[in-house]
Amino acid sequence: MSTEVASGAVVYQQKDGHPAYLLLQSATSDFWGFPKGHVEGDETLVETAQREIREETQLDVQVDAKFKAYTEYDLPNGNLKQVTLFVSEVPSGVAVTRQTEEISAIGWFDYAAARERLTYDNLKQLLDQANAYITKKA
C-alpha cells in the first residue's frame, strides 16, 4: 500500500457579509469538492495548494496557513490518501476559469448549500472546520 499526499484549500469570498465557498465538480465523476491535488517533488503543502488552485481555477492565491484541516481515507486501489486543506480568501467577483480537462463545473455556494453539494462526509467536516475559522475571524 502506498500513501498519496494531497493539498488544497477551501477558497472563499465575502458576499453580503457572509462567506461564499468555491466548489469544483470533477470531469470524470459527479464528485464535488475543493481545489486540491497531489504534492509534486519537494513542494510544501502550501505550495501544492497554491499550484493546484492556479491549475484548476486560474486563481493566483495566497493561503492562510494558520488554518489547517486534515483527513485521510482508503482509496479503491488500496492506497491511503492524506489530504490537508488550508483556507484562501479571494476578492468578491473574481473571475474563475475552470481547467476543462479535470473540472466540469464550478460554483460559489453559501455554507448550507456548499455543505449539501459536497459529495463526501469528510469534506463536509472539513468545511465545518473552515467555516468556523472564517466566521470567527471575520
Image (cartoon, rainbow, N blue to C red):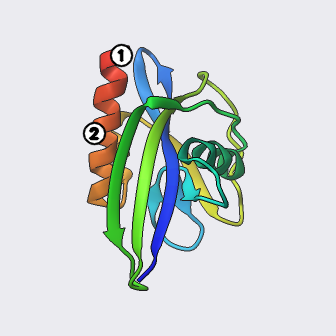
Dot 1 amino acid type: Lys
Identify the disc placed on residue 115: none
Relative depth, front residue between 14 and 71 = 71
Q: In which quarter of the image is residue 73?
A: bottom left
Side (left or right) of 103 relative to 132:
right
Check the image and report above or below for 34 versus 94.
below
For mark 2, what is the residue?
Answer: 128
Quarter occupied by the C terminus? top left
- Pointer 1: residues within 10 angstroms few (<14), some, or many (20+)? few
Which residue appears at 46% of the width and 39% of the height? Answer: 86
Identify the disc placed on residue 137: 1
x then y, percent, for residue 106: 57, 49
Check the image and report above or below for 33 versus 86.
below
x then y, percent, for residue 129: 29, 37
- Pointer 2: residues within 10 angstroms few (<14), some, or many (20+)? some
Quarter occupied by the N terminus? bottom left
x then y, percent, for residue 7: 51, 52
Helix, strand or loop under label 1: helix
Helix, strand or loop under label 2: helix
Which residue appears at 42% of the width and 26% of the height? Answer: 19
